[in-house]
Image: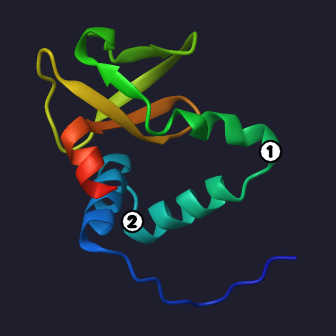
Amino acid sequence: MNYEKNFNLLLNNDLLHTITMLASAKGISVFAEIESILTQHFSKPELVGITDLVGTEITDHQLQDDGLVKLHGVLYFYQLVDTKRYRHETYVVADVTDQKVYLVAKGEYYAGN
């Protein structure tokens, strides 16, 4: 049974900015991004492990030029959100899908949390 319910959600500006950046990077609406976050949060236990990557710090030298990054022995495509790649920069995993991680600059991530 699927039930739909309308509700109001109050977000602080930093969190809304982060969600907007992630939605834009994925090419989806902010609502779809919020729905995705909620779905991941309440997903079945076998899907929860992938979200453990959120908050993982990654240095620039771990990022491959072909768009791949290896995390815990698994290769993921990565996308930098609202930043460019800089030498000696540290990035943080802000979101994860099945095969792609979305990275933000370390300072941006901790400013939003």
Asked if residue 93 lies left or right of residue 5, the reply is left
User: Mark 2 highlights which residue?
Assistant: 29
For the point 88% across and 76% down, the residue is: 1
Q: Which of the marked residues, 2 or 1, is nearer the chain's N terminus?
A: 2
Per the rendering, the mark at residue 95 is none
Q: Where's residue 112, x and y in %? A: 28, 56
29 in relation to 26, above or below: below
**Residue at the outermost right position:** 1
Secondary structure beneath disc 1?
Answer: helix
| Amino acid on which the number 2 mark rests in the picture | Ser
89 in relation to 28, above or below: above
Asked if residue 39 lies left or right of residue 81, the reply is right
For the point 24% across and 25% down, the residue is: 90
Per the rendering, the mark at residue 45 is 1
Q: Nearer the viewer, residue 40 or 55?
A: 55
Q: Where's residue 18, x and y in %? A: 30, 57
| Amino acid on which the number 1 mark rests in the picture | Pro
Q: Where's residue 57, x and y in %? A: 37, 27
- Quadrant of the frame with the C terminus: bottom left
C-alpha separation, residue under disc 2 versus residue under disc 1: 26 Å
Q: How is the image coloured?
A: rainbow
Q: Quadrant of residue 55?
A: top left
Asked if residue 28 lies left or right of residue 14, the reply is right
64 in relation to 1, above or below: above
Q: Nearer the viewer, residue 79 or 86?
A: 86
Please rate how many residues cluster around mark 1, counting C-alpha atoms within 10 Å: few if below 14, some from 14 to 19, many from 20.
Answer: few
Residue contact between numbered discs 2 and 1, judged by CB atoms under 8 Å: no
